[in-house]
Image: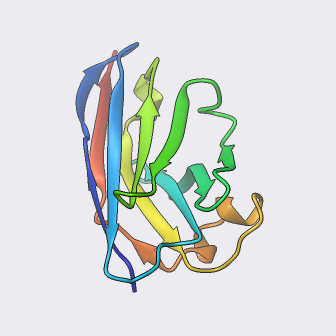
Amino acid sequence: QVQLVESGGGLVQAGGSLRLSCAASGRTFGPSAMGWFRQAPEKEREFVASIIWSGGQTYYADSVKGRFTISRDNAKMTVYLQMNSLKPEDTAVYYCAGSQALLSMRQSSMRRMYDSWGQGTQVAVSS
């Protein structure tokens, strides 16, 4: 099992930026894929972005494409989510997730494909 710890959430005005971090630990080898999901009050947890660890391929939800960027630091076993041009509708608890399975890009957007989850970090965007 991989342990994941998120950080970097907070309160920001619309149009602002935040960078979330997720540090992975607990195994001698890293995850195959990592993703970010978010859950707003009374809504389902939804996919935001994912990255295939070895090749660095990325995949984004349409709602964040062009505004958010996912990246990873192999040496630090950390994945980042740079969020620019934030909107009030981006307000949610953001969770990072890791998968040991070899995923296609399409599969990397599916919650059920992930076996490790962080505790979540709150992002609030004011209008």
Q: Could you say which is closer to the camera, residue 119 or residue 99? A: 99
Where residue 96 appears, as percent x and y from the top left, is 42, 59
Color style of the picture: rainbow
Point 63% across, 51% down: residue: 56
Image vertical order of residue 12 relative to residue 27, above or below: above
Q: Is residue 68 left or right of residue 26?
A: right
Q: Quadrant of the C terminus?
A: top left
Where 115 falls versus 111 (above or below)? below
How far across and how far down the image is residue 23, in percent?
Answer: 32, 60
Q: State the residue in front, 29 or 39.
A: 29
Q: Residue at x 38, y 57 (%)?
A: 75
| Quadrant in which residue 81 is drawn | top left
Apparent side of residue 84 relative to residue 60 in the rendered image (left or right): left
**Which quadrant is the N terminus positioned in?**
bottom left
Q: Give the answer, above or below, for where 84 lies relative to 116.
A: above
- In the rendered structure, the answer to whether residue 65 lies left or right of residue 78 reads right
Among the 4 quarters of the image, the one containing residue 24: bottom left
User: Residue placed at 41% from the left, 45% from the top?
Assistant: 80
Q: Position of residue 123 (x, y in %)?
A: 30, 38
The mark tally for this picture is 0
Q: Is residue 44 visible?
A: no
Identify which residue, 80 or 9, lies in the foreground.
80
**Residue 15, image x, y percentages:** 40, 13
Q: Give 115 or 45, whichever is nearer the viewer.
A: 115
Q: Residue furthest front?
A: 75
Q: Residue at x 26, y 23 (%)?
A: 12
* Residue 66 visible in the picture: yes
